[in-house]
Image: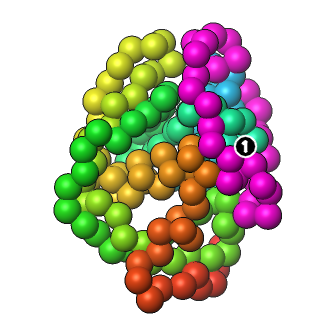
Amino acid sequence: MALRTIRTDDDPILRKKSRPVENYDDRLFELLDDMKDTLEKAQGLGLAAVQVGVLRRVVIVNTDGKYVELINPEIVKEEGIQTQPEGCLSLPGRAGVTKRPAKVRVHAYDRNGKMHVYTGTELMARCFCHELDHLDGILYSDRLAEGESLYPVEE
C-alpha cells in the first residue's frame, strides 16, 4: 500500500467525469487500499479516486472510524435539507457553507462486486453527496448555499 498525491483545485482532472468500474481485480484492490492510507494520513472524511488522479467511480468514506468503500455509487433517494460548513482535501485551507440533503440512500458495490445499500444522515449524507459529486467533476464550491462564499480555515 502506498500514499497517493491528492490533486488540488488547480488540477483539471478534478473537473472530469469518472468512468464506471468494470473489473474487480488487483488494480482496484490496490487503489482502494492506497486511498484508505491516503485518507488516513490526510485525516479527511472521504476521498474519491479522481482526487488521486484516477478517473474511476470509486469513493472511500470514514465518518465514524469505519471505512466504507463505494464502487459505482449512486444516490437513489434524498430527503430534507441541511446547510452546513464543508471543506475538501482538494481545496486546502478553505471552507464554505453548502446546501445538501439531510438524508440520502446510496446503492454501491463493495470490492468483491456485492451490492450494498447505505443510508446516510447529517454528516454521512454530506460526505456521500460531496464524494459522489467528485465523480462527476463537481466541487463543493459549486454547491455553496445562496449568498455564501469560500472562507479561509486553519489546517
Number of numbered discs: 1
Residue 98, horizontal then vertical, whole percent:
42, 72
Residue occupying image coordinates x 73% and y 63%: 9
**154 is within the stretch colored magenta:** no
Q: Is residue 41 visible?
A: no
Residue occupying image coordinates x 33% and y 74%: 83
Magenta-tinted stretch: 1-28
When asked about the image quadrant of residue 123, the answer is bottom left
Q: Is residue 28 above or below residue 145?
A: above
Residue 71, horizontal then vertical, whole percent:
49, 28
Q: Nearer the viewer, residue 42 or 76?
A: 76
Residue 79, horizontal then vertical, whole percent:
20, 55
- Element on which disc 1 rests: helix
**22 is within the stretch colored magenta:** yes
- Rendered-image quadrant of the N terminus: top right
Identify the residue under disc 1.
52
- Rendered-image quadrant of the C terminus: bottom right
The chosen color scheme is rainbow
Circle 1 Cα neighbour tier, 10 Å, few/some/many (<14 / 14–19 / ≥20): many
Residue occupying image coordinates x 43% and y 34%: 73
